[in-house]
Image (spheres, grey):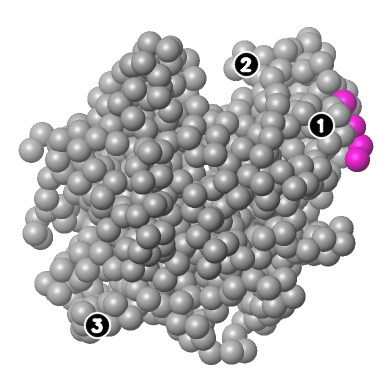
Amino acid sequence: MAPCYAMRTPPRPCYQKGVQTSSPRDSESLSKGGGKTLLDAVWDAHTVRELPNGDTQLFIGLHLVHEVTSPQAFSMLREMGLRVRCPERTFATVDHIIPTDSQRRPLSDDLAEAMMTELERNCREQGIRFFGPETGQQGIVHVIGPELGLTQPGMTIACGDSHTSTHGAFGAVAFGIGTSQVRDVLATQCLSLARPRVRRIEVGGKLAPGVYAKDVILHIIQRLGVKGGIGFAYEYAGAVIEAMSLEERMTVCNMSIEGGARCGYVNPDETTFAYLRGREFAPAGEDEKRVIEWWRSIASGPGASHADRVSLDGREIAPTVTFGIHPGQSVAVDARIPRPDEVRDDERAGLEEALAYMGLTAGAPIAGTPIDVAFIGSCTNGRLSDLREAARIARTGRVAPGVKALVVPGSQAVARAAEAEGLPEIFRSAGFEWREAGCSMCLAMNPDKLVGRQMSASSSNRNFKGRQGSPSGRTLLMSPVMVAAAALRGCVTDVREML
Amino acid sequence: MAKIERVVGRACTLRGDDIDTDRIIPARYLRAITFEGLGEHAFEDDREQAKGNHPLDDRRFTGATILVVGHNFGCGSSREHAPQALMRFGFQAFVGGSFAEIFAGNCTALGLPHLCLAPEALSALMDSIDLDPSQEVVVDVANRKVSCRAGTFDASIPEGAHRQLVGGTWNNTAVLLEAGSAIEATAARLPYLKRSEAA
C-alpha cells in the first residue's frame, strides 16, 4: 500500500475563506423545492419565542446533569430564589470524578465525595432522578442517556458537557453548555441560542476491515479542521453512516465538538427506532407508533436546504491515529508524521509546537511509536460494541511488558452486558485491568492519570496537552481495536495486520 | 446588570491557535463546588512549562485587563471554569481571531466581551501591544471597534451577544423567565412529551 501522507494530499478545505468547498455556498442553489433540515424542524418545534437580542428561546426537552458543572448552577438558582422548572425532564448521574477501582462510599477521595454529596443533595431538594452507583444505572452521562431510552429523536438536549453532541446520533439536537447556561435550563427549561447553519457531510462507499466509526470522525476532523465547524451543525449522512449501528453513530456525533461544530446529528431511521424499542424511558405501544410517525417526518428530506455540503469516500479512510495536541492532527496508521514544510502556512506553528510537545519526529512513521499506557473507554468509545471489538484483539495475545492497560466500561449496564459475554475474563487474562464505570482517564479527574511524560494510546476524544492528568502527558487518539493492538505490541500498530 | 459598552486598559498578547480550555484551567481544578480561587491557576501547566516566559507571567503585562489571542480560542471542554479563571485572573475582555462557540457563550453569560478581528488587524494589534505593552487599548463593544496606537480596527461579535452585553441583559435566566407560560405551551405541543403528561 502506498504511504498516505495525509498532509500532502490537497490542503484541507478552509471554509472560512470559502475555498475548496466541494459544493456551492449558496443555500438556495442546494434547495430542491424547499423542505427543512432536521435541525430546522426540531428548532422550529422547540421555539418558545424570538428574543430581543435576535436569538431564539429554545425549549429543552431533556436536561442531563453531572457533578462537575452543576453545583455552581444549583447555588445560583438558590441565590435567585428559584426552583428547577421541569425536574421530570432533568436527570443526573456521577461520572467525571468517580473512582473506577472502587465506588464504595464514602469515596476515598474527599473532594470527589464532597462533589457527589452535593449532587445528591441538589437532586433530593429539587426532585431530580439521580442515577447513582447504587442504582445499577450509573455511568457516563452520554452513555446512560441513550441506553435508558431518555435520548430520543427530535428532542432538544442540553448538558453541561461538550460531548453532549453524542446524542445527535438519534436525530436529536444536543448542545454542550456552560454552568451559567445549566442555571438557565434548570430555572427555565430553555436556552437562548442562535440557530446554526447546517453542513451535510456525506460519507459514501463502505469501510474497509479494521476501519471504525472513530476513524471516520478523526478523518472528517482532519479534513475539515478543528475550527471548520464554527457556526455549523454537522449532519452526517451517506452509505457509511446509514450502515452504522447507533453506537457507531454516537462515536461520530460525539466528536463533532472536536471539529468546532455546535452539534452533530444523524437523521433517524429504522436502526434508530429498533435501538430504542423496549428501553426504559422509550415510548411503547400506541405512543411509539404515534411518535415514530413524527420522528420520520422531521428527518431532512431530499429537498432540504443545507448551507454547505461535503462528500467523502469511506473507502479512502484508514485506521487513523493522532500525532499532535489537537484531534485534527492525525494521519493514517501507515502514513508518516507530516513535516512542517508540507502543511499550510497557518498550520505550521501548531505542528511545530505539537511535535515538540509530543517528542515525535517530523517525517517518521507513526506506526511503531512506543506507548506506556493503553486506555479503552470514554463517552466516545466505552460502549459494548467497542469492548467487544477490542476483546477480539485482546484475546490474541498479552499486554506488552511495561504497558499499563485499562478497560473502563462506559456504564454499569455496559459492564453487566460485557460480563455476560465473558469480556472481562478475556481482557484480564490478556493483562488488561477491568474497571468500574466512569469517565476515568479521558480527562483524569479521578485517580486514573498518566504520570510524567507517559505516552497513552487512548480511545477517548482529546489529545490536548495535559489532558490525561499529567501536565506533560501525551495522548495518541485511535479506535478501541487500535488501542488493544498497541497494548499487545507496545507501540502504535496497524490493527489490519492482526485481523 | 451592567451594560458592557467598552473596556479600556492595558492588554496582554497570547499567541497561538486552538488553545483549549484544558490548558486554560486543568481539569484537576474542576474538583470543587464553587468557582472560587480559579484565577491563580489560569494556564497553570503552560506557565510552569514556560518557566516564567509565559505572557501571564510577563511583568510588562502585569495588570492587563484585555487578553488578545489567536484563532479558535477556548476550544474543547465546555467548562465555564475557563472564562471564570481568566476573569478572576483580571481579564475583562477578549480580542482574538475567532472563539470556540461554547467558550464564547460562557463569556457572554459572564459579561465578558469577545471580539473577533480580521487576521491582518489582529496581527497589527498584537505587534503594537508587544512593542509597547504600557499603551491603552480600547475595546469598544458598542461600536465593534478595537483601538491601539497602530490604529482602530473593525471587530465582529455575534449579534445576540452584542445586544446582550451592550444592553446589560447578559444574565439569560431573567430574560428567559419573562416568557412565562409560553414555555409550558411550547412543551405541550411536542409530540414526545404528550405521552409523559398522560402517564
Q: Nearer the viewer, residue A176 or A348?
A: A176
Mark 2 — residue? B118
Q: Nearer the viewer, residue A58 or A176?
A: A58
Amino acid beneath label 3: Ala
Is the residue at mark 1 from the same chain as the one at mark 2? yes
- Residue A385, by quadrant, is bottom left
How many residues crowd mark 3 within 10 Å: few (<14), some (14–19), many (20+)?
few
Amino acid beneath label 1: Leu
Mark 3 — residue? A420
Q: Position of residue A402 (x, y in %)?
A: 30, 74
Amino acid beneath label 2: Ala
Q: Is residue A188 left or right of residue A220?
A: right
Q: Report whether residue B69 is seen.
A: no
How many residues crowd mark 1 within 10 Å: few (<14), some (14–19), many (20+)?
many
Q: CA distance from mark 3 to mark 1?
A: 55 Å
Which residue does the image show at 65% across and 81% down from the upper left? Answer: A113
Closer to the chain start, of discs 1 and 2, is 2
**Magenta portion: prevailing SS class:** loop
SS at mark 1 in the image: helix
Looking at the rendered image, the quarter that the C terminus of chain A falls into is bottom left
Mark 1 — residue? B165
Q: Chain of mark 1?
A: B
Q: Position of residue A60 (x, y in %)?
A: 60, 49
